Image: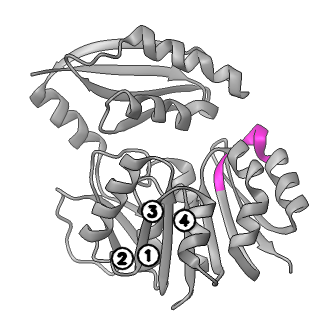
Amino acid sequence: MRWMKVAVHTGAECEEAVTQILLAAGAQGVVLEGDGSRRAVIAYLPEHSPVSAVDIEQQVLGLQRYGLEPGPARVSVEWVQDEDWAESWKRHYQPLAIGRRLLVKPAWVLVPPSERIVIELDPGMAFGTGYHPTTALCLEALEELVRAGETVVDVGTGSGILAIAAARLGAGSVVAVDIDPQAVQVARENCRRNGVHERVWVAAGSTAAARALLAEHQAHLVVANILADVIADMAGDLYALLRPRGVLVASGIIDDACPLVRRSLERAGFSIRDERARSEWRCLIAERTA
């Protein structure tokens, strides 16, 4: 069987949106390549995929309607055989040490025993494996902020990596939500793979679903690694998920969008405690003030 290797050349601001376009087109995962202003989101689609390169290019260009700048929005296609596709994934998915205590690895890679906390993920989900700067920023923040027995909410869980990390770092219970049903399924599988499925509840939906799972309780910590404008829009809902003095870790924020997110969080009642950067991405750590 042949696979269509699709490379979308775009700007950093649109990486996550392009990833979702490719996943919706039938890709089982993506690879992110390049740095600075030159980025490529690469995916593999089945040979007889009903979605063409032209379709994908039009969807990427359509991101302008949502205030995103897709950059060159150029789509290139290459045909590869099964074995080439498999080897390509293996080259890109290698164990990755993050922070002082975490190690993220694909399920099929064996690693020698170490003192690090190992998070094992399905290698088919590239976005949410720790390779993207925003995921790494969130993992490092969780490593510092998670306290034993506390409640954590992960909004936009994707592969489940942040929810799993919170549980492995000692959280007593974790609520993870995502609006993508496929992501919910993948996150549940990854939770079982890591032995945290009894402490992590994964559900389809957004902040309303998280509130329902929390019932009468509020979280000590909320993490949201999603699009900047979505964080800005749901700032009040994120605030409501937290107990007083609770902490929000927000990322998925490109440089230019950071002022908007900061203003939205402050209007909702948050106090910004810290702003961290990696490449052109930002992570905000904010506290509910009352």
The residue under label 4 is 154
Q: Quadrant of the C terminus?
A: bottom right
Q: CA distance from mark 2 to mark 4?
A: 22 Å
Task: Name the amino acid, label 4.
Answer: Asp
| Mark 2, secondary structure of its residue | loop
Q: Is residue 1 above or below residue 33?
A: above
Q: CA distance from mark 1 to mark 4?
A: 20 Å
Mark 3 or 2, which is nearer the eye?
3
- Stretch of the chain drawn in magenta: 251-258
Q: How is the image coloured?
A: one colour
Disc 4: CA contacts within 10 A as few (<14), some (14-19) or many (>=20): many
Mark 4 in CB contact with mark 3 (< 8 angstroms): no
Q: Check the image and report above or below for 214 versus 104.
A: below
| Mark 1 or mark 4: whose residue is earlier in sequence | 1
Whether residue 213 is visible: yes
Q: Residue at x 68, y 72 (%)?
A: 241
Residue sticking out furthest to the top: 54
The amino acid type, in three-letter code, at marker 3 is Ala
Residue 62: x %, y % from top left: 61, 18
Q: CA–CA distance between discs 1 and 3?
A: 28 Å
Q: Verify CB contact (< 8 Å) between mark 1 and mark 3.
A: no
Residue 101: which disc?
Answer: 1
Tell which of 26 and 103 is nearer to you: 26
Instruction: Examine the structure image and report whether residue 244 is included in the region drawn in magenta.
Output: no
Q: Secondary structure at mark 4?
A: strand
Left or right, 80 with reference to 288: left
Residue to which mark 2 is pinned: 116
CA separation in Å, label 3 and label 2: 28 Å
Few, some or many residues within 10 Å of mark 3 (<14, 14–19, 20+): many
Disc 3 marks which residue?
Answer: 203
**In contact (CB < 8 Å): disc 1 and disc 4:** no
Q: Measuring from the top left, give residue 174's x and y in whole percent.
A: 49, 76
